[in-house]
Amino acid sequence: MKKKLLLMLNPHAGKAEVKNKLLDIVDLFVKAGYDVTVRPTQRRLEIPDILRDEAAQFDLVVCCGGDGTLNETISGLMQNGQKRTIGYIPTGTVNDFATSLHLSKNMLVAAETIIKGFPFSCDVGQFGDRYFSYVAAFGAFTEVSYQTPQEFKNFLGRTAYILEGVKRLANLASYHVRFDYDDEVIEDDFLLGLITNSYSVGGFRFISQDRISMCDGKMEVLLVKTPHTLSERFAIVNALLHQRIDPEVMYFFNASKVKVHTLHEIAWTLDGEYGGSWTDVEVASVKQAVDILVDTKVK
């Protein structure tokens, strides 16, 4: 009996190239012995509904799209209490999580990885009652992903994020935030906060791979202080450009759970999508919560 594969795809992700490759992708899966059902998504947050109603009917779930599509897939499985092995064909603009997993941006190669690869048990971030695959963030540049029009992202690729971010440089807000973790407390004014489970955020590698793991039940937290002098502003720009952590203007730590408190609501993004505005939220790592098919060792 053939194994059943559910292929969910975002037809608008990236440059919408999946439309030209869909037949070839399906052909690969059929030749590998799968009976394939294709479900193009029609709206945001549709994938969790599809998984709730249909996932149990399939042997393998595959999503094709950008970071947002993967987020919906992982969130749907987590919300429905389904521990499943999933395949991911990245087609979005930046694909931070795919980069961390060494997944090819060639869709046919990524499909072959799903067929021949092995499952990697990956941590998932929990943000209140929601989930994220690679980052929860607030502050400078973090709203760029969901405020930049999709057509503009498709045309310019990563440059879209840079252009939109540069336009905001003159009006960066400061956020007074308290972080409680592992009997430690950090309270300060911040320009940017990233809680991650990825080597790459926004297409840039801010954290050395030898300092993090994607399956250890811990998140990496990078906090950029609000600069008060020209030298501090220069230090931040220099650190980000050279993709390194400067302890004079940044905090960096690992934690399995972080409680975040602010006096005023702060807007967050989860995997590049709007995550709501919060004054208090608990962020935790769910250790090895989902299995993703990869073709190389990921630590």
Image (spheres, rainbow, N blue to C red):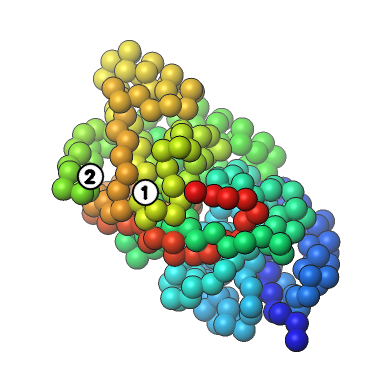
Q: Which residue is mark 1?
A: 219
Q: Furthest residue to the bottom?
A: 1
Sequence-first tag of 2 and 1: 2
Q: Position of residue 176 (x, y in %)?
A: 22, 37
Q: Residues within 10 Å of mark 2 (few under 14, many from 20)?
A: some
- Under circle 2, the secondary element is strand
Viewer-closest of 157 and 76: 76
Q: Residues within 10 Å of mark 1 (few under 14, many from 20)?
A: many
- Under circle 1, the secondary element is strand
The answer, for residue 169, to whether it is visible in the render is: no
Q: Is residue 11 above or below residue 35?
A: above
Is there a contact, CB below 8 Å, between mark 2 and mark 1? Answer: no
Give the Cα separation between the discs numbered 2 and 1.
Answer: 13 Å
Q: Quadrant of residue 172?
A: top left
For the point 29% across and 33% down, the residue is: 251
95 lies left or right of 235: right
- The numbered mark at residue 179 is 2
